[in-house]
Image: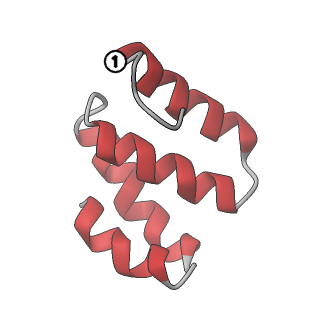
Amino acid sequence: MVNLAIPYLKTKNTLKALPYLDSAVIADSSYIPALWETGWAYYLTENWQKVYTLWSRIKALNPKMPDL
């Protein structure tokens, strides 16, 4: 699902990317690439609560994740 969202993210078409990204997170809430990309998509929409929730999940899964 994340792969389907990437072309939309590259063109900053976040609203089209988010359904794919949200589905990826629902399917596997421990898949860090999905959490990361979904966090960035919500960052672009300025939904700070979602960003915090998603990136906090990454930190819990991988405390040494760079760039967090």
> Taking 55 as reference, is 33 above or below it?
below
- The kind of secondary structure element at disc 1 is helix
Horizontal side, residue 43 vs residue 29: left or right: right
The kind of residue on which mark 1 rests is Leu
Q: Which color scheme did the rendering employ for the protein? A: secondary structure
Q: Quadrant of residue 60?
A: top left
Image quadrant in which you'd find residue 65: top left
In the image, is residue 44 above or below residue 48? below
What residue does disc 1 label? 61
Seen at 37% across and 81% down, the residue is 7
Q: Is residue 45 above or below residue 15?
A: above
Task: Name the image quarter holding residue 28.
Answer: top left
Where residue 55 sits in the image (x, y, percent)? 52, 32
Residue 22 placement (x, y as % from top left): 41, 51
Foreground pick, 55 / 22: 55
Residue at the image position 64 percent from the left and 31 percent from the top: 52
Q: What number of labels is visible?
A: 1
Quarter of the picture containing the C terminus is top right
